[in-house]
Image (cartoon, grey):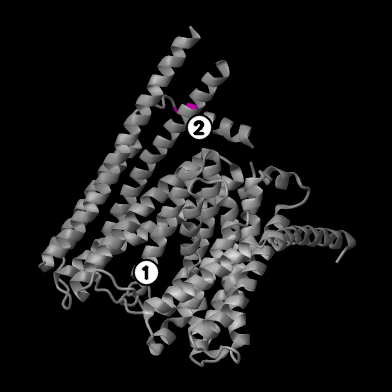
Amino acid sequence: MSTRAEGMVAGVLRRTWAMTWKDVTVELRARERINAMLFFAALVLFIFNFALGPDQEKLREVAPGLLWLAFLFTGMLGLGRSFQAERENECFEELLLTPGDRESIYFGKLAGNVLFMVTAEALILPLFGILYNLDIWGLLPSLALVAFLGTVGFSAIGTLLAAMTAHLRAREVMLPLLLFPLTVPVILGSVRATATILAGGGLGEVSHWLKLLGGFDVIFLVVCPLVFEFVLEE
Amino acid sequence: MEERTVVASAQWASEHGRVGAGASLAAKVLGAAAALVLAAGLYLGLVVVPPDAVQGDVQRIMYLHVPSIVTAYVAFFVVFCTSVLYLWKRDLRFDAVAVASAEIGVVLTGITLATGSIWGKSTWGVWWTWDARLTLTAILFTIYVGYLMLRSFAEDPRAGARYGAVLAILGFLDIPLNHFAVYWWRTLHQPSSIIRPGGPSVASTMLVPLGINFAGLVLLSIYLLLERVRLERIRHRTIEVRLKRGRRG
Amino acid sequence: MGNWGFVGLAYGLASVALFSYLLLLKGRLRGAQEELAALERDSGRRTR
C-alpha cells in the first residue's frame, strides 16, 4: 500500500477509535446505559418465567426466543441512547464540523454500540442459563459466534437509524418501528441458530443461518457507512 | 445544499404552465384505460375462467392477490431507484415519484395482505397463518409504512426526503434477505407455481386474467402516481410562494 | 360464509381500498390547489 493510502486508513482508524473511546469513557463514568440495559434484560427473563409457569419443557422450547428478546430489547435501549448525548448537548453540528469522513463517525458509534450490547449479552447469558436451567458452558463458543454475528447486524442498521431518528418527533416509537422489520433476517437467523445449538445441534447444522447472518452483516456494513453522510447533513 | 434543492423545486413547480390546472390528458387517458383493463380482468377472472378443480371458486381471489403483490414490488423498486437518484441529483421530482410510488405500494401491499388473509380463511379456516408469504408481506408492509411515517415526522421536508431515501435503499436491499430468512423458517404456502424452471404449472387459462389484472393495476398505479406527483408539485409551489412572501416581509 | 362470499369480500375490500385512496387523493389535491390559489391571490394583492 502506498504511504498516502496508509495515511488515510490510519486516519480513519484513529478517528473511529476516538469516537468509540469517547462513548466508552462517558459510559464508564455514569454507567447509565449498561445499568438500564441489564435491568431491563433481567426484568424480561423474570417476567417470562412468571408468565410461562413452572413447566420445564415449555420453558426449554421458548428459551432461545426469550434470550434474544432480552438481547434485542436491551440492544434497542442502548441504540436509542447512542446519539442522546449529541442530541441533548446539541453536538450534532460539532460532529459535522470535525474534520474527517462521516464513515469514521459511523464506525466509531457502531463499535461503541456493539461493545455495549456484547457486554450486556455476556452478563445476560449466565443469568439466563441459571434461571432457565440450561447448560450453556459447553456451547459457549457456538452461542457466542451466533450472538456476535447477530449483534453486529442489528447494530449496523441500528446505529444508522438511531442517528436518523435522533431529531425526530416520537423518536422512541420510530426507532423500533423502523429497526425491527429491517432486522428480521438477523432476528430469525439468530433465534433459529441459537435454538438448534441449545438443542444440541452443532455449528454445521446451522451453517445456512450463519451464512445469512454473515451476508447480512457484510452488506449493511458496506451500505450503512456509505449512506450515513446523508443522514448527518444539515 | 439547501439553496440547490429550493431552486430545483422552484424550477419544477413553475415549468409546464399553471400548476393549478387539473389532471393532465395523459393521466386521464391512463385512468380510463386502467378502468377498462381492470373491468376486463374482473370479468375474465370472475365469470369466464372455470373454477379451480380443488379449491373451487375461492381460487378466483388469486387473480387479485398475485397481481397486487407483483405490482407492489414494482412500485417499491421504483421507490428504490428514485431514492438513489434523489440522493445523487437532489432533484425533488425524483423524491416526489418516490413518495407517490411508496404510497401506492403500501395500498397494494395492504390489499395483498387482506386478500391473502381472506383466501387463507376460505381454504384453511384461519384468518392468519405464519406461513412464508403472508409473513413476508406483513414485514414488507411495515417497512414501507415506516417509510411514510419517517417522512411525515421529519421537521423539514428536505430532511424527510433524505431520510426516506436512505431508508428506502436499506429496505429494498433487505427484501431478498427477508425472503431467505422467512422461507427457511417456514414453508406452508403453496410453492411459487409461476416462476419455476420448467414453466408455469398454473393452467394457461389462469395466466390470462392474472396478466390482464397485472396490466390493469400497473396502469392504475401510473395514473395514481401522476396525480400524486401533481400534488407534490402543488405543495412545493406553495412552499416557494411562502418563502418569497417571507422575504418580502 | 360461502365461497362466493369470500370472493366478494376480497374483491370488495380491494375496490374500496383503491377507490378510497383515489378519493382521498382527489381531496388532498383540491385542498392544496385552493391553498395555493388563496396564497397567490394574497401575494398578488401585496405587490400592488
Q: How many marks?
A: 2
Q: Which mark is residue B166?
A: none
Q: Residues within 10 Å of mark 2 (few under 14, many from 20)?
A: some
Residue type, numbered disc 2:
Trp
Quick one: label 2 or label 1, which is nearer the N terminus? Answer: 2
Residue B139: x percent and y percent?
41, 64
The quadrant where residue A48 appears? bottom left
Which residue reaches farthest right?
A3
Q: Which residues are magenta?
A: B12-16
Circle 2 is placed at which residue position?
A: B12
**Is A123 colored magenta in this rendering?**
no
What element does badge 1 sit on?
Answer: helix
In the displayed structure image, the side of residue C31 where residue B155 appears, left or right: right
In the displayed structure image, the side of residue B114 where residue B2 appears, left or right: right
**Which residue lies at the image location 35% right of the left edge and 25% below the top edge?**
C34
Q: Is residue B97 visible?
A: yes
Circle 1 is placed at which residue position?
A: B135
